[in-house]
């Protein structure tokens, strides 16, 4: 028998612990009130006779109290209850010692791996993580209602980012970089004026990103199209300088050529500044800024040519990568890139197709960029195209008092995610019970989300001047409250969800990719979407349905349910739940079908949706990837490639490992041949159908792979 502890851990049943607890209570009462050894054995025998595979520690304690009362040991039962209550108070008084000590010892795997942009071994990052554990403790014991904490602990829902909840800060945002560059800003009490060159503009952008990231959690997104104006400023400045200096010595063509040479040099340096600054800057919470660069060419942009040059340079530098400490070019985690496909660059003969070809080349090697279809996005967001926030959640359309759409300078207040599979496990194919439980748990999520909102109400702009006073979000007065930006849909409050695939398997016995399963899954999605609309109407807040990319949560929910309900085929037996509406990774489905299928769910999940396609290293077969990108433009709003490439653990080489005629693996950089020190996912062509890539030990298998 396994005993499930209060923190969710599963431990072996130990009868001696029951005996010890009762005997400690025995010592506190008169001899005639004590339980005899035989009576203690009978209590233990009763618990063991239940023949449970799993039992909660609280259930064991309830049984002990009941049995002591049944044998008229009332004083002893009272003493045992008092002992139990005292232990609970001790636990509540200090719940952080163990987690903090395990952080310092680098053994707290769950916390250390929660964020990809945090190196938990660094002292500066550990300070933030330690503070986070204190925040979680206070949040659970004092700040949140007990029913929300209990729901979080039981995996009914997930209250995201408890480690920041004690502070009046929000989740993620779209930085209003245009306002901050054009009208100036202030950092650390110093005025930053409008830049007079592209290089300076790039430097200011990185400083803004670092300052913004230090006063919030979640990510930040920056629309790079606002830098086109400053590239032209540099161009005009160079032209004026060179014309003044050489107008009597050089003809116009030569001067224009020199201008372009200087401009390209400044362009390269400016983009390199952004790339290196973001990858080397540390925010005050000990992490790299979680930043996304939005690459969009608007046909009506007066600086479209300059912005095309900027995008081209960003993609070129991203393709090259950044050298690691061993001098090997690797893929940097940040900044994330999002490339927008539109009429003029969708690989259909448009003027800027060359940029998309470069983006595809970059994706084949470096994982980024992600792709947004302007065509599909306009269909879903009232004709608008805009960046998701750094956490990949989307804002709902919102108009200012002049009737103009506004996206930059807006933000997300917080996220709570619901565990869909757990409802399916409990309902056990009873649809009436499912919908009843579903609504009850959605109400819990709403209550938790309102806790997010209420925690921000009354916040004054002084808590983060860069956000509230100097343009990143707003230009409020000192001492002014941010409340008006929390209401009326200006900012969003996000309902996340995990495990639609597993829920459908539990309730219908089939995947949501089947007709029967799809009908049910879409009904579930639409129900959550309608709830968000209902809550918005009721409260005036911008509730939104968010297909969260929180991979770690997929494992947490699955782990909790495995401990509570045991192994369930295709559900808890995998060790993880499928993210949001995604197709399960084990289903035999090609990339095109996956994207087409998931696009129907993206339009419902308007508060955030992304679809992943896992593909091989496609460096030598770009045509196949270009076809996939064309397909994205016509069929799905937002997609990302997970490109599997080879990796040498000895030298850090990130490319294609050589496999010779003897089927030996060899790193072309350091010539390491130790198979155990390589991550090799060798795929030899651009086939995008069912996964069948294996390098075997026989000539026949090798030939088949090469044929594919």
Image (tube, helix red, strand yellow):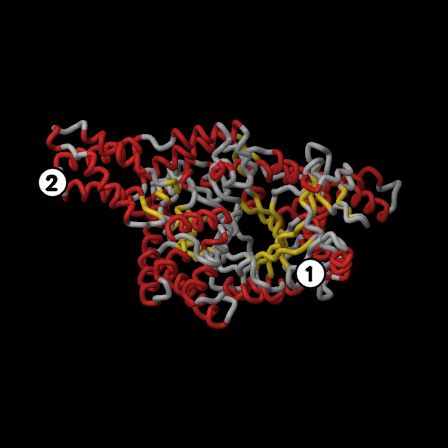
Q: Which residue lies furthest to the front in this view?
A: 38
Q: Quadrant of residue 27?
A: top left
Q: Which residue is drawn at 47% across and 68% down?
A: 517
Q: Quadrant of residue 210?
A: top right
Q: Which one is nearer the viewer's eye here, 639 or 438?
A: 438
Q: Which of marks 2 and 1 is nearer the N terminus?
A: 2
Q: Evaluate whether residue 390 shows in this view.
A: yes
Q: Residue at x 36, y 63 (%)?
A: 428
Q: Which residue is drawn at 60% across and 37% down?
A: 204
Q: In this view, does 462 lie above or below 293?
A: above
Looking at the rendering, in which quadrant would you find the N terminus?
Answer: top left
Please give the residue where the numbered disc 1 appears in the rendered image.
Answer: 345
Q: Residue furthest right?
A: 249
Q: Quadrant of residue 240?
A: top right
Side of 645 relative to 544 (left or right)? right
Provide residue 360's location: percent of width, then percent of height. Answer: 70, 55
Provide residue 279's location: percent of width, then percent of height. Answer: 62, 37
Element at label 2: loop
Q: Is residue 473 above or below residue 670?
A: below
Q: Which one is nearer the viewer's eye here, 615 or 681?
A: 681
Please give the residue where the numbered disc 2 appears in the rendered image.
Answer: 72
Q: Distance between the residues labelled 2 and 1?
A: 82 Å
Q: Evaluate whether residue 271 shows in this view.
A: no
Side of 543 relative to 661 (left or right)? left
Q: Which residue is drawn at 56% across and 57% down?
A: 585
Side of 622 relative to 253 (left or right)? left
């Amino acid at each position: 028998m396994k005993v499930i502890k209060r923190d969710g851990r599963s431990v072996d049943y130990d009868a001696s612990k029951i005996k010890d607890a009762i005997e400690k209570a025995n010592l506190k009462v008169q001899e005639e009130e004590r339980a005899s050894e035989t009576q203690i054995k009978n209590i233990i025998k009763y618990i063991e006779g239940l023949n449970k595979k799993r039992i909660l520690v609280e259930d064991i304690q309830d049984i002990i109290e009941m049995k002591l009362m049944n044998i008229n040991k009332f004083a002893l039962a009272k003493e045992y209850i008092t002992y139990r209550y005292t232990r609970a108070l001790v636990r509540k008084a200090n719940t952080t010692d163990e987690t903090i000590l395990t952080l310092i010892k680098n053994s707290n795997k769950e916390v250390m791996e929660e964020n990809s942009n945090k190196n938990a071994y660094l002292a500066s990052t550990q300070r933030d993580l330690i503070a986070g554990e204190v925040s979680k403790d206070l949040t659970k014991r004092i700040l949140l209602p007990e029913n929300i904490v209990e729901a979080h602990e039981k995996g009914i829902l997930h209250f995201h980012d408890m480690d920041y909840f004690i502070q009046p800060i929000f989740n993620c945002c779209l930085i209003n970089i245009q306002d901050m560059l054009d009208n100036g800003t202030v950092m650390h009490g110093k005025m930053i004026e409008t830049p007079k060159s592209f290089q300076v503009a790039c430097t200011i952008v990185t400083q803004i990103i670092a300052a913004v990231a230090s006063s919030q959690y979640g990510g930040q997104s920056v629309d790079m199209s606002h830098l086109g104006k400053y590239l032209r400023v540099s161009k005009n400045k160079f032209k004026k300088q060179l014309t003044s200096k050489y107008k009597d010595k050089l003809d116009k063509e030569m001067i224009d050529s020199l201008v372009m040479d200087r401009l390209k040099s400044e362009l390269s340096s400016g983009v390199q500044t952004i790339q290196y600054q973001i990858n080397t800057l540390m925010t005050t919470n000990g992490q790299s800024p979680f930043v996304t660069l939005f690459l969009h060419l608007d046909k009506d942009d007066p600086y479209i040519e300059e912005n095309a040059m900027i995008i081209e340079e960003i993609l070129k530098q991203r393709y090259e990568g950044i050298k690691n400490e061993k001098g090997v070019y690797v893929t940097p985690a940040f900044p994330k890139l999002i490339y927008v496909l539109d009429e003029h660059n969708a690989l259909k003969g448009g003027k800027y197709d060359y940029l998309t070809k470069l983006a595809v080349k970059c994706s084949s090697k470096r994982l980024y960029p992600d792709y947004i279809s302007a065509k599909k996005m306009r269909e879903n967001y009232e004709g608008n195209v805009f960046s998701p926030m750094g956490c990949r959640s989307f804002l709902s359309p919102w108009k200012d008092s002049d009737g103009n759409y506004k996206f930059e300078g807006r933000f997300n207040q917080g996220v709570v995610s619901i565990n869909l599979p757990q409802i399916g496990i409990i309902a056990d194919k009873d649809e009436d019970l499912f919908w009843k439980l579903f609504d009850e748990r959605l109400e819990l999520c709403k209550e938790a989300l309102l806790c997010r909102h209420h925690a921000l109400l009354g916040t004054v702009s002084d808590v983060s001047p860069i956000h509230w006073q100097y343009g990143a979000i707003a230009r409020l007065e000192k001492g002014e409250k941010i409340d008006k930006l929390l209401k009326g849909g200006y900012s969003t409050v996000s309902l996340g969800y995990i495990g639609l695939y597993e829920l459908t398997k539990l309730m219908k016995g089939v995947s949501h990719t089947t007709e029967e399963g799809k009908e049910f899954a879409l009904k579930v999605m639409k129900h959550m979407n309608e709830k968000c609309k209902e809550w918005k109407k009721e409260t005036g807040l911008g509730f939104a349905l968010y297909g969260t990319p929180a991979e770690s949560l997929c494992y947490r929910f699955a782990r909790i349910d495995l401990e509570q309900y045991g192994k369930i085929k295709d559900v808890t037996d995998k060790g993880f739940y499928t993210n949001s509406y995604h197709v399960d990774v084990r289903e035999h489905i090609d990339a095109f079908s996956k994207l087409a299928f998931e696009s129907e769910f993206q339009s419902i999940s308007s508060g955030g949706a992304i679809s992943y396609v896992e593909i091989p290293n496609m460096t030598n077969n770009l045509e196949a990837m270009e076809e996939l990108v064309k397909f994205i433009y016509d069929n799905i709003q937002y997609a990302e490639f997970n490109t599997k490439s080879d990796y040498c653990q000895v030298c850090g080489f990130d490319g294609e490992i050589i496999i010779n005629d003897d089927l030996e693996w060899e790193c072309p950089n350091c010539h390491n041949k130790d198979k155990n020190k390589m991550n090799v996912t060798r795929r030899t062509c651009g086939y995008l159908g069912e996964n069948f890539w294996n390098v075997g030990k026989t000539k026949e298998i090798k030939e088949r792979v090469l044929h594919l």
